[in-house]
Image (cartoon, grey):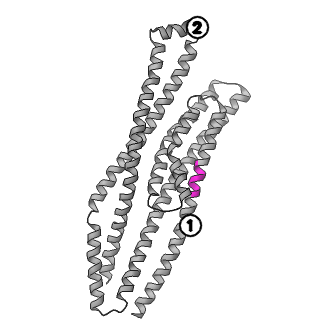
């Protein structure tokens, strides 16, 4: 029977993995559609904003008018800021799309290797049931049922553990963003107290640049965290919260890129990152509770299983 159990455990894990990948792929396909539309839209906006910059820098009546009114440099600065913000948002969305496409390919390749696992599992299970009956085991059906329940719970524990790992990564990344924004805020405060100097100006922007790169990575990790949660039922309200992760980068870039010098924008971004971090922590707490509950049920089933085996 040990040989049967070893085969069934391995095949059960493959079947659970196949089911998980299929659910996650469905979510990734939806993300792909959304991001393809988003990048297409952002590319048009980026080109439009850059066109406004080019018109002001070129020899056009539009540029001449603003030059004569004395507002050309002011307008050019504003248009360059908007063009830069549009490019950053496009680059971020494109990076997200590349990440999703990479995950889709990886999942498809893995699914191809798992395509026959369910058939193989059913065949081995049938062989074991036949072997148990040949031994005249009165508890054959109950033993097989308990083993199946145990395998289901072990697979669920593994899925929860994987989701917790993804969530912890997103939480740590959010912490890095908070650190960079906090440093930028400190230098912004210094500007207000000591006056705008080149050292504080450069330091503030360096920290904002770090935050920008970290935000892009955080957005990718938030998407992966959501994907890991697709086939783990937590609660309806938590599903809404997790879906809210996906627009986070847009909020950040709309709120801070267009006007780097406004301290209030840094404060708003800090509040938003902290809100996201709190949401992640809430999901992690629920997952931790689910893990503990699943572990207790698993131990109860194993105890019952061992008692039956001893008495059989």
- Dividing the picture into quadrants, the one containing residue 54 is top left
Residue 251: x percent and y percent? 55, 38
Magenta part of the chain: 276-282
Vertical side of 275 occupied by 10: above or below: below
Q: Is residue 256 magenta?
A: no
Q: Earlier in the sequence, mark 1 or mark 2?
A: 2
Work out which residue is located at the far top of the displayed protein and give it: 68
Please say whether residue 210 is visible from this viewpoint.
Answer: no
Q: Residue at x 39, y 81 (%)?
A: 145
User: Where residue 69 is drawn, which disc sits there?
Assistant: 2
How many numbered circles are shown? 2
Disc 2 secondary structure class: loop
Q: Main secondary structure of the magenta part?
A: helix
Foreground disc of the pair 1, 2: 2
Q: Which residue is mark 1?
A: 289
Quadrant position of the C terminus in the picture: bottom left
Foreground of the two, 308 or 183: 308
Q: Residue at x 29, y 92 (%)?
A: 135
Q: CA distance from mark 1 to mark 2?
A: 65 Å
Dot 2: within a 10 Å radius of its alpha carbon, few (fewer than 14), some, or many (20 or more) residues? Answer: few
| Label 1–label 2 contact, CB within 8 A | no
């Amino acid at each position: 029977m040990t040989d049967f159990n070893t085969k069934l455990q391995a095949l059960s894990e493959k079947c659970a993995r196949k089911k998980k990948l299929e659910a996650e792929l469905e979510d990734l396909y939806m993300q792909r559609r959304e991001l393809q539309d988003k990048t297409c839209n952002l590319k048009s906006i980026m080109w439009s904003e850059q066109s406004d910059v080019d018109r002001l820098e070129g020899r056009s009546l539009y540029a001449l008018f603003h030059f004569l009114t004395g507002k050309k440099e002011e307008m050019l600065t504003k248009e360059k800021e908007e063009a830069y913000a549009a490019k950053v948002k496009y680059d971020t969305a494109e990076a997200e799309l590349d990440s999703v496409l990479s995950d889709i390919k990886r999942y498809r390749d893995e699914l191809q290797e798992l395509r026959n696992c369910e058939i193989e599992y059913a065949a081995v299970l049938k062989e074991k049931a036949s072997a148990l009956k040949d031994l005249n085991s009165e508890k054959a059906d109950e033993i097989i049922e308990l083993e199946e329940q145990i395998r289901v719970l072990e697979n669920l524990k593994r899925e929860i553990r994987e989701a917790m790992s993804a969530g912890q990564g997103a939480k740590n990344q959010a912490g890095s963003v908070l650190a960079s924004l906090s440093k930028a805020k400190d230098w912004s405060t210094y500007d207000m107290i000591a006056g705008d100097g080149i050292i504080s100006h450069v330091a503030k922007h360096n920290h904002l640049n770090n935050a920008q790169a970290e935000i892009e990575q955080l957005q990718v990790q938030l998407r992966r965290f959501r994907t890991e949660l697709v086939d783990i039922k937590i609660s309806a309200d938590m599903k809404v919260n997790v879906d809210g992760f996906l627009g986070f980068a847009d909020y950040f870039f709309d709120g801070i890129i267009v006007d780097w010098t406004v301290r209030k924008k840094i404060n708003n971004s800090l509040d938003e990152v902290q809100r996201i971090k709190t949401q992640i922590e809430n999901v992690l707490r629920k997952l931790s509770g689910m893990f503990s509950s699943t572990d207790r049920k698993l131990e109860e089933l194993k105890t019952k299983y061992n008692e039956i085996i001893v008495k059989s």
